[in-house]
Structures are given as structure tokens and as C-alpha cells.
Image (cartoon, rainbow, N blue to C red):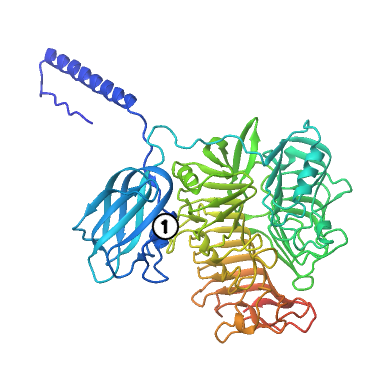
Amino acid sequence: MSVALVRPSRPPTAASHRWRALALALVTTLVAALLAAVQAAPAQAAPVLLSQGGAVTASSQENGGTAAGNAVDGDGGTRWSSAFSDPQWIRVDLGSPAVLSRVELAWEAAHAKSYRIELSADGNTWTNAYSTTTSTGGNETLTVSGEARYVRLTGTERATGYGYSLWEFKVFGTRDGGGGPEIPGGGDLGPNVHVFDPSTPDIQGEVDEIFEQQEEAQFGSGRHALLFKPGTYDDINAQIGFYTQIAGLGLNPNDTTFNGDVTVDAGWFDGNATQNFWRSAENLTLNPVNGTNRWAVSQAAPFRRMHVKGGLNLAPDGYGWASGGYIADSKIDGQVGPYSQQQWYTRDSSVGGWTNAVWNMTFSGVQGAPASSYPNPPYTTLDTTPISREKPFLYLDGDAYKVFVPAKRVNARGVSWDGAQQGESIPLDRFYVVKQGATAATINAALAQGLNLLFTPGVYHIDRTINVNRADTVVLGLGLATIIPDNGVTAMKVADVDGVKLAGFLIDAGPVNSSTLLEVGPQGASADHSANPTSLQDVFVRIGGAGPGKATTSIVVNSDDTIIDHTWVWRADHGEGWGWETNRADYGVRVNGDDVLATGLFVEHFNKYDVEWYGERGRTIFFQNEKAYDAPNQAAIQNGDTKGYAAYRVDDSVEQHEGWGMGSYCYYNVDPTIVQEHGFKAPVKPGVKFHNLLVVSLGGNGQYEHVINNVGSPTSGTSTVPSTVVNFP
């Protein structure tokens, strides 16, 4: 509201004084009235998009490519279309009751002339919120009012001879008609976060009890985070089992010191460490009891922000098998001994030495790393990491929990924490602390009101997509928090915005096939995020193993400049609910965005391509792959005229791409006669380059004819010896 006050020209002096006094009084009165009105009115929560990713059903669909879910997926290039008859309907479940304010419809040419918008609390009894008989299609914004959980569009007369066809069906409203924040930030961290300080009694006993529960629980539901406040802890040996995170709560690893060890061994699996997955250690300083700490792991077991004042042994007791892992932002004062580790990637760290290599040891930005000497010994060493940003982590500032988000580094070398740390601290009250039982609707409402997400250790079943639409949002999991889409939805989608940080969680495919499990940016994303990229760190995906699961493509990266920093995307080859069709998953990771960097890319066992890359100027530093064990025969993997699908394929349209330290191996134990034409496929162009590639047949169970395209020698007989290519082309 504004008031224009016009003063007469050249007023007499007395009149001028009177006019100014009158104007001042009028303005004062108006301001007071406005303030009173503002104070009297309760704060109203802004309407938010409630329908995106929701559970949706329809009376029919035209074909397999026009499913109902397309109308609520946030993608303006996909649509729902019905059968060619009247009436037809599409219904979305908002997950919980909401106060509705508007509906937005984006019609394809085949639109409705007559339709109505209906609301329901229970999905059975409906009330009319809007109707028309004269719609001209296009984009329509409809004002509605009422409280409902279910919203239905019912078309009663088509405008064309085709069915009803919607690009998008959006419902807006609020979960709470009252004032103030709908969902509080902060709060306690739940029962599965175990916080210790040096005075806590029987720390060793509690840690041992959790290890006893988790040592062999490879596909169990237990999730735990062991968090240690700053201080010194004597005589500790923290053995770390499945779905267990151990971390210090200092801002610097040296704030929390163990005079003892953080141990992973493989006694539970007869000395074989190839299944020591899903656990982590971070932000601690160790003084190992015997001078060397043992961390015998394979995939999805990061070792981050650790300071080992001694050596680090990456092999199990007895030097049994181990199949590759990941270290970042860590300082190991002594020597690192990988011994039986087949492949390993170390990034932005410092080591006192490195003792040996089996197939593929890759380093970027590591002080003390051995010089490149591939293939004898198989060391691939980059002096710096082109772009990196360390994983966000929880810490204590006095008695207050905060999350520290490290800053992006360019051409990084060495740890980020030796000296002043660059980044941002975010108080816990700016996070929705997600606990077991939380619904996707509540999670989305928290995101919509501007909160970040901190998933406490647990398993979260969701019936709709989690939509991360705000720039710089942090989604951080503790204790390998696990998200399961129950009804074939995509578990999480990130908008084409700057600086989203996804870290520390597992997405487990549900029994109903999801077309995708994680999408970074919508199809066609094109914004420049080079100054502030989105990052995925210790984000893992599993299809099958814990039970039947299916997904056509696990991770799709559409946003430019994304950083994929350590992911294991795995179609199960053991456990429950696996088999060539039982846990069908054709594609692991698909990259459509430009300037995407992957540092530590582990992708295994997909029915077709494990990695497909369509974006320009993509880079991968370290790739570990194993082709699907369970192919029944040669015909099952035949790719047109090509024998098998490459583990890593760069599309023929790509002009620039580069990769370093990349391996693929096969173990076709169902039919050992299967032949894989190559592990890698790429266009032959000056800008497409690969360095230090290998393929290997495990014991002769299947063979590779070449390493990349038609380049490289075949694997040979039953000898588990890699075939290598140093540079391509």
C-alpha cells in the first residue's frame, strides 16, 4: 500500500509547516495501521509443490511410454496419455492431507474440452473443486480450495480423437494451514547414533556389542553410527561391521585421537575380504597398537579424513582376497600395504610410502604416491585432482551439532584439513533430522520450506520421489542410512541447481521396477554449475541382495559439472533376490551432462552397459568393474553384432573424454564359454583419450577378445593375468 502526498507549489511558510505536520501524521498513522495488520495476521506457509514424485494411478494408459507417473515426474518432456475414450481419470496421492491452493495442468495437443478436479480425504469419497466444459488446453492454472490427500482429474469430453494427454499435473498447497515453520529443524539424533566421550563407561563393550550384531549382517536392517567427541581414547579396538560408521566429532581429525585401532578384518568370511562392504571411517586420528592399522575392505567402505600415525594394512589377516577400495583426504604417516588388494584408489591424501600393487593402483593429488609406472608395477599417478570437494560431516562446536561443508578445491594435492579449512558450517537446526518412520511427503515438505536433510541410521521406505529443488541443499546420511522406493518411483531427483551435496547413504531398489533410482538434473539440463557443482559422495546403489529389486537405470546425471566422488553401483550377485531376470537392471550409470568428473567410480554386474557417457568433456579417474556373473549364455548378452555390452561406453557423438586407471573383469561362472568382445568402447577421435586400461578373466570363466574397441590382446585361458593398454588411441 502506498500514499502519494502532493505539496502545493510555493506555499506560505505557515502553510508549509502545517502541511509537513499533516503529512507526517498521516504517514505515521498509515504505518501504525499496517504494522497492526501485519501483527494481527498469522504467518502463512507458502504453497509448495506437493504432487511431484507422488504415487499416481490412472484409468488407462495409451502405451508403455505414457505411464501415469510421467505426469508427476517434473519432466516436461514426458507425458501420461489415456485410451481413446471417455471418461478417463488420473489420480495423485499426496501422501498426507494438505490444504490445497492451486492446480497447474500442462496439456499436450490431445487435451480435455470438459473435465473436473476432484478432492478426497480417503480416495473413495470425492468432492468437486473445479470444473469446465470449455477448456482450450495448453498451460492452465486453476485456483482450488479444500483439504485433501488425493486429487483427481476426470476428463469427460476429449477435444480430439486421441486420448487425454498431460505433460504435467501439479498440485500446490501446504501441509499445515497455520503459521510458523511446518517442520522443526534439529533435535536428537535417534537411537542408532551412539555418542561417546572419553569418560563414557565401557566404550569397548558397547562397540563390541554392535560389532557382534553387524559382523555378518551383510543384508540385515541394523544401521549404526559410532560418534566420538573430541578427546583422547585409550586402549580402543573398534571393529567395524556392516552398515556401521565410525567418526570423530571434531572439526579436525586430530581433535579426536584413539590410542588404538579401527579394524576391519575378514574372519567372518574365512579370511576373504571381497564382501566387506558398506561401512566407513572418518575424521579420527589413530595411534595403532602395533604400529599398523588394518582396514581390509572392498567396495562401499570409504576411509576419509583419517590420520594414521603409523602404517595401514589393506589386506585381511592371512592375506586373503580383497577387491578394491577408496581413501580420501587422509594422512598415513607410515607405509600403506595393499598386499592382496586387486584395485585401489587414493585421492588428495598423504602417505609415507606404498608397498606393492596387484592389478590397478590409482592416485590423484597424493603426496608420497609412487610414480606412474603402469603396467609394471601397475601404478597410475596424477599429480593433482582437477576438481574436488570433500564430503560434508557432522561435528560438535562446543555442545552444538553442526555440519561442515568443505569448499571446492581446484588442482588439489594433499589433505584439506592441514591448516585453515575452507568451507561453511551449517547449524543442525537448519536440517530436518530424518528418523525411521518419516514419510517422503514429510521429507519433501521439509525440503520445500528450506531445510537440509540429515538421515539418521535406519531403513526408509518411500512411496514417492524425494525432490531436492533448492541450490546448496545438503542431504547427508549417517550409518549407511538406506532409502528404498516401494512402488517403482525414482528414489531421489535433484533439480538443475547449484551446489547440492548428496553424501553417505544407500539407495536399495524395491521389488517394483524403477525406471531410475537417482537423477541429478532433469532431462535437457543445461545450466552452468562450474563455480558450484553438485556432488555425490559415498552414495551407493544396490539392486537385489537384500531381497528382489529392479531398476532400469540406477543413476542418471543430467546436470553439467557434477562431481561423482566415490560411488558403488551394484547389481547383486549373491544374497537374496538375485538372478539374471530376478534383479534385472540393464544400466548402471548414465552421464548426459557436460564437464562431469568421476573420482572413484565402482559399477558392477549390470545386464547391459555398466556405464554410458553422452556428455562432453567427461573425465573418470579410477574405474572398477566386474561384468554380470549370472549371464546364462552368449545369447543373453549379445549386443547386435557385438559380443557383450562394454563395461564403460563413450557414445559415438562425444568429441572429448578422458579416463585414467580403469579396469574391467569377468567371471561368467554360469557359462564359462561366454566371450566379451571388449571391456571399453569409445569413438576414435583426437579428444577421446584413455590411459592405463585393463581387462582380466578370473580363472578363465569367460574371456575378453580386446581391451578397448578392437585394441589390446585377448585374455588367455585360465590364467588370471590382465591384458592392458597404456594409451588409447
Q: Position of residue 487 (x, y in %)?
A: 50, 58
Residue 83 lies left or right of residue 263; in this view the side is: left
Residue shown at the point (23%, 23%) measured from the top left: 30
Residue shown at the point (55%, 48%) measured from the top left: 475
Residue 223 lies left or right of residue 446; in this view the side is: right
Whether residue 412 is visible to the viewer of this picture, yes or no, is: yes
User: Please, is residue 109 above or below residue 683 in the view?
Assistant: above
Q: Position of residue 692 (x, y in %)?
A: 69, 72
Name the foreground residue: 329 vs 582: 582
Name the foreground residue: 597 vs 687: 597
**Amino acid beneath label 1:** Val
User: Please, is residue 102 above or below residue 727 in the view?
Assistant: above
Q: Tell me the quarter of the image containing the C terminus.
A: bottom right
Residue 444 lies left or right of residue 331; in this view the side is: left
Name the foreground residue: 5 vs 293: 293
- Count of labels in the image: 1
Q: Quadrant of residue 194?
A: top right
Instruction: Farthest residue to the front: give it.
Output: 124
Q: Position of residue 609 (x, y in %)?
A: 58, 73
Residue at the disc numbered 1: 56
Residue shown at the point (34%, 24%) measured from the top left: 39
Q: Position of residue 592 (x, y in %)?
A: 49, 66
Instruction: Farthest residue to the top: give it.
Output: 14
Residue shown at the point (61%, 63%) measured from the top left: 548
Mark 1 neighbour density, 10 Å: few (under 14) some (14–19) many (20 or more):
many
Q: Tell me the quarter of the image containing the N terminus.
A: top left
Name the foreground residue: 323 vs 561: 323
